[in-house]
Structure formats: structure tokens, C-alpha cells
Amino acid sequence: MAGIGFELRRLLRGNGLTGLLCGYGYAGLISSGSWVLSILGVMAIGLLAAPAFREPALVTQFQVSITYVMAASLIFTGPLQLYFSRFVADRIYENHEERIVPNLVGALVLTTTSACLLGALVLATLFPTWQLLQQLLLLATFVVLCDMWVLVVMLSGLKEYNAVLKVFLVGYLLSITLAVALRSFGNIGLLAGFFAGQAWMLFGFLARVLARYPAPELCSFEFLDKRLGIRGLALTGLLYNLAIWSDKLLFWFNPGTSYPVSGPLRASVIYDMPMFIAYLSIVPGMAVYLVQIETDFAELHRAFYAAVRTGEPLSELRRLRVRMTDAVRQGFHCIFKVQGLTILMLVLAGPRLLGVLGLSPAHLALYTLDLVAVGMQVVLLAVLNVLYYFDQRRVALWLSVGLLVTNTVFTLLSQFAGPRFYGLGFASAVALTAVVGLGWLSRKLWRLEFETFMLQR
């Protein structure tokens, strides 16, 4: 974390406006690079490979199948992502770094085995007419993505943002290059190229961990010991990932808002593309989030609890609490301001942008709602991150439950109401959850000294 903070401050303080732009650009890339590169990578493969296919439906089949695999891998590994990341953080705090690699191998063994079994069962049951090689490539991609998300969340939790960004950047360049080079082999070539890039990323992340931490033994499943783990985080990880994808799943499997692609796979023309474009707008908000929350607030958080441990007077604790509260308030103020300006600029550019992408002007209202929804998701991510700093796991769990329920219910209501209301369900659910989370966070900061001393067991 110190390296990230130092690098950001060096860029932000240097060369006036240029330093400011470089600093925030750097922060935006390292905080949202994995999301942005994933979206751009899949879209780029489709655009570059399309001219070689006589049947455009084959490119659509590739993009849709990869989207489904990504969604399934994120939801499937949701229980392990936060759970294992917390396990690793606890071992570092206890100065037992030698336990990280053996348990990581154990987590990857568990993930690989279970993903293989589940993926093989789904492919054999739902895609019996697909070619065997195509099934195997999809299965291998699913397994690699599952393993990769475990490593990405772990490295992000350890503030290894630089490593994550660099590996993602090279990996997706490799995926795009190989997929386009192999496009003459049809859909199988596209899948093979994409898989190769993802596999390279997996081993790149793994090499980073192995180079940093010792490995006194090969494999351990100590992380499954309920005395060492935080089981509630597993449920939170599952519910949050399911909540983020629930509106997409409802649009995909509603016959009135989607069309069949291949087998049980369906896509929603009216919903998917505006949503994917909107997710590219997260970069400015995530940049502010990293600069304000993961540097300024994080340092004051450490200082506050260091003062608690060393027995500093109450006046000093109150001073640090006020500074920490101001840092959080300033962080959210900047997120709202920067993300709001980004949304305004992209809404104004919406008609021309949709025209360039070949989308109808009828998508403009949905595109606008998606921009607002993604902006509020950045706010929600910041809220959850600050709550985790204060170990408010139960609050984070209830926020995830609330997001899942509201996104599901509001999306169903929007579908019932008609096309003019599409996107309103997701936007309303994320906004409501973020506002409730901000209220909880405000209460936590106001009562921080009381809860620190009076609620200890």
C-alpha cells in the first residue's frame, strides 16, 4: 500500500495539471483496469474477427458465451473471493506469511476441482450438440477464470494494483492477438486465443505471489478451518456478485427482452450493449476512490487504531476521528463530483456515441440510466470498502442482501412496465443500497470512539 500511495502522491504533486492528470489516470487504470480491459478485450475480439466470418452469428456466439462464462465464474467464486482475501490479510497481520502460499494452492485446488465438475456437468447437460473441442475450451476458460478471480481479489486486497494492471494489460493484448490470428479456425480459434491469454494471466498472477511469499509446504486447507476464517464473508461475496448480475440474467432469460444465441444461451440486444458501454465510465470515479479512500483515509485509519493501541488521550482520538471523517466525506464528495461530470459529458455525447456503435437512438434513455447506475455502483463499492476497514461485515452482508432483493424486484417491475423503464430497476437498486450504506457509515463514524471502547467483547 505504501508503494501505491507514494507513487500517486509523486504524480499528483508534479508538473501542475499534467501531474494531476497523470496521477488520476494512473489511479483509474490500476483500480478499474481489470473491468475495463475485460469489456474492451471481448468487444475488440468481436470487432476485429467479424470481417473473417461469413456468419456474424458466430462472433455473437463467442462474445455471449464468454460473457456467460465470466458471469458464472464471478458468481461461483464469490464465496471464496472475500473469504480467502481476509484469511491472507489475517495471516500477514499475525506475521505468518509462510501460510499464504500453501493455502493459496489449497484454494486453487478446491476451486479447480469444483469448477471442473460443475462446468463439465453444465456443458454435458445443456450443450450436448456443441463440438467436443469447443466444450473443452469453454470448460478450460471457466476453470482458469475461476482461479484467476481468487488471485486477483487476493492481490487487490494486498494493494498489488500495479501487478494486477500489468498482467491484465499484457494478458488481454495476448488474448486479442491470438484470437484474431486464429480466427480462420472459426469459433474454436477465437475461444483458443482468448483462453491462451487468460491462462497467461493466471500464471502471471501466481508467479507474483510465489515470488513474494515463502512456501514451506506444497498445499494446505487450513483456510477452511472455521476458527481461522470469517464464514460470513463467503455469503457476502456470493450475494454481492449475484446481485450485480441479477438484472442481466433477468433480461437474458426473459423471452420478451432477449433472443436465442446457441442452445440455452440468450442475449438482450436492447440491454447488453448500453450496459457494457456504461461500465467504461467507471474509470474517473474509481480513480478518485483509490486516491481519496485507499490513501488518505487508509493512513488516518491506521493512525487512529495505532493511537488506540498505544493509549493516546481521548482528545487525540477525537482529533484523528474528525480527520478520518473529513477524509471520508471529502472522498465521497469528489466521487460524486467527478463521476457526475463524467456522466454529464457521456450523456451529451450519447447520440453520437450510439451512432458510431450502430445503436438506435431508442437506446439513449437506457444508456443514461446505466451511466447513473454504474456511477452509484462506484459509490457503493467505496462504502463497502470503508465498512470493511471498520470490520462491519454484518452491515456489508445486509447491504448485499438488500442489493440482490431490490435489483431483482425492481428489474422485474421495470420489465413489466415496458421498454421506457428498462434500466431503472438496476439504477434504483444500486442508488438505494448506496444511500443506505452511506447512512450506516455516517453512524459508524459518529459513534467510533464509543464503539471502539464500549462494545469490545
Image (spheres, helix red, strand yellow):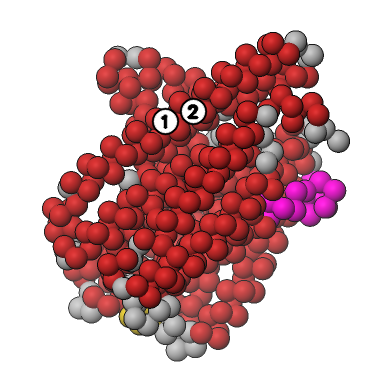
Mark 1 is on which residue type? His
Residue 60 place in picture, x, y as percent: 30, 72
Mark 2 is on which residue type? Arg
Residue 94 place in picture, x, y as percent: 79, 32
Characterize the local packing of mark 1: few (<14), some (14-19) or many (20 or more) Cα atoms within 10 angstroms. Answer: some
Residue 368 visible in the picture? yes
Q: In the image, what residue occupies the spot 60% across and 40% down?
A: 440
Q: Which residue is mark 1?
A: 333
Most foreground residue, 13 or 155: 13
Q: In the image, what residue occupies the spot 37% across and 25% down?
A: 23
Above or below, 383 relative to 411:
above
Residue 352 place in picture, x, y as percent: 13, 53
Q: Which residue is mark 2?
A: 329
Element at badge 1? helix
Element at badge 2? helix
271 relative to 290 in the view: left or right: left
Q: In the image, what residue occupies the spot 69% across and 16% down?
A: 317
> Most prominent secondary structure in the magenta stretch?
loop
